[in-house]
Image: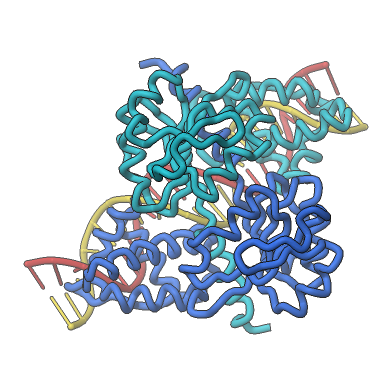
Chain colours: A blue, B cyan, C red, D yellow
Amino acid sequence: MKYAKIPEITIHRLSLYARQLALLDMNNVKVISSVDIAEACGVNSAQIRKDLAYFGEFGVRGIGYYVRDLLFELRKILGLNQEWRLGLVGVGNLGAALLRHAVFLKRGYTFVKAFDQDPKKIGSQIGNLVIDPVGKMENEIEKAGIDIGVIATQSQMAQECTDILIRAGVNGVLNFAPIQLKTPPHVHIENVDFTLKLDALCYKLTAESKAPF
Amino acid sequence: MKYAKIPEITIHRLSLYARQLALLDMNNVKVISSVDIAEACGVNSAQIRKDLAYFGEFGVRGIGYYVRDLLFELRKILGLNQEWRLGLVGVGNLGAALLRHAVFLKRGYTFVKAFDQDPKKIGSQIGNLVIDPVGKMENEIEKAGIDIGVIATQSQMAQECTDILIRAGVNGVLNFAPIQLKTPPHVHIENVDFTLKLDALCYKLTAESKAPF
DNA sequence: TGCTGTGAATAGTTTCACAGCA
DNA sequence: TGCTGTGAAACTATTCACAGCA
């Protein structure tokens, strides 16, 4: 085990491995080799062993990895062995869909607050959450003990809302708005940017049709 | 200009640059330097010049880049100077939100078909689209001339639906399901995976609180 | 034997630093 | 002068290949 700083991409892959192991565990698979995880995740097997080596030695030579043990370790590494409290900012089409999305709950993420600036939405209920005004955010976030802010506002509002989140003490932001947020270094941002992914698809489809065959 | 193969990450950055340039153009900025684009996008300025160099010489020494010209070139490179026809598979919370999402239309993407397997949803209307049964997909997709399939189904359905898309001749898939899709090499997949991003946030927030200060 | 863990080799990406040009 | 475009250097990530061990 090394004490180097861990590449971002390794973390993303660990999450991928964890997901795959959860699937295997559900199917009652007990032991698996790095080659088989690699196959399922579309990566090289040495990559997996290297990724894991940042954090310890989890395998058994000649055998492989015990699915449930490795899953447990990965969840511990990623910090998924605890409940995370999310606050949603912007309850438009996308925001509302996220609130209702089962994936979050299944994985220990709970939306405990939702904010919007539209007076027509404020006070209305989605699931068991009542939508609060953005004006109350700064106070409510601290009260509710929110760990992670989820930005699903229009792009124009995103920076302003993020600033409020940060003032309220939130250090992690999941940003769905297609904009580069400016934040102080202690705040962690992850962007979910599907317009960018769509553009990349278009490039590939276009470049391919231009290429000589 | 080089004829090397272009890294995926360069394409993603080009999309980022294009977005930034569109913003500048809207604000009537005429000329900009790589240093200023770099600042706005959070990258190194040499990076931008290198990325552009894959495709040509778009700048003027001593001056910088003409915003509108560079934007035009980037849109051409990415293939955004045409209309793209999208087909949605899975009209759940997320799928319905995507159909209603203004971002797509603003950028030349149009959903021309939507499919679901739920008999209660089939025939109902969202925007100006009537939801069709998944059973009709293979035929309808070819008829509708769909370029890109958007998977917003449950994970269990995602692979099956993708297979149908591919059989119907779709070569580009934007996948919102948290699963690694298996596809033949000529098919391009982009994954929009916010559970993975959330996990990464949790890691960073956790690792930080463990780190020595 | 058959796997993991890892040093070494390779491949890829980013940044520096400056020549070259409007 | 003040920028771009780009070789060279530095850095980072991936893959190979095999020692080491259950």
Viewer-closest of A156 and A200 = A156
Q: Is residue B209 above or below residue A34?
A: below
Does residue A40 appear to the left or right of A76 in the view shown? Answer: left
Q: Position of residue A148 (x, y in %)?
A: 66, 68
Q: Which residue appears at 72% of the width and 59% of the height? A: A89
* Residue B151 visible in the snapshot: no
Viewer-closest of A161 and A21 = A161
Q: Position of residue A49 (x, y in %)?
A: 34, 66
Instruction: Locate the C terminus of chain A by quadrant.
Output: top left
Q: Is residue A110 above or below residue A177?
A: below
Q: Position of residue B135 (x, y in %)?
A: 32, 34
Picture quadrant where residue B198 is located: bottom right
Q: How many marks?
A: 0
Picture quadrant where residue B167 is located: top left
Instruction: Locate the N terminus of chain A by quadrant.
Output: bottom left
Q: Which residue appears at 64% of the width and 40% of the height? A: B101
Viewer-closest of A119 and B102 = A119
Q: Is residue A123 above or below residue A83?
A: above
Does residue A168 appear to the left or right of A189 in the view shown? Answer: right
Q: Which residue appears at 71% of the width and 35% of the height? A: B19
Q: Which residue appears at 39% of the width and 69% of the height? A: A52
* Residue B71 visible in the snapshot: yes
Q: Position of residue A22 (x, y in %)?
A: 34, 67
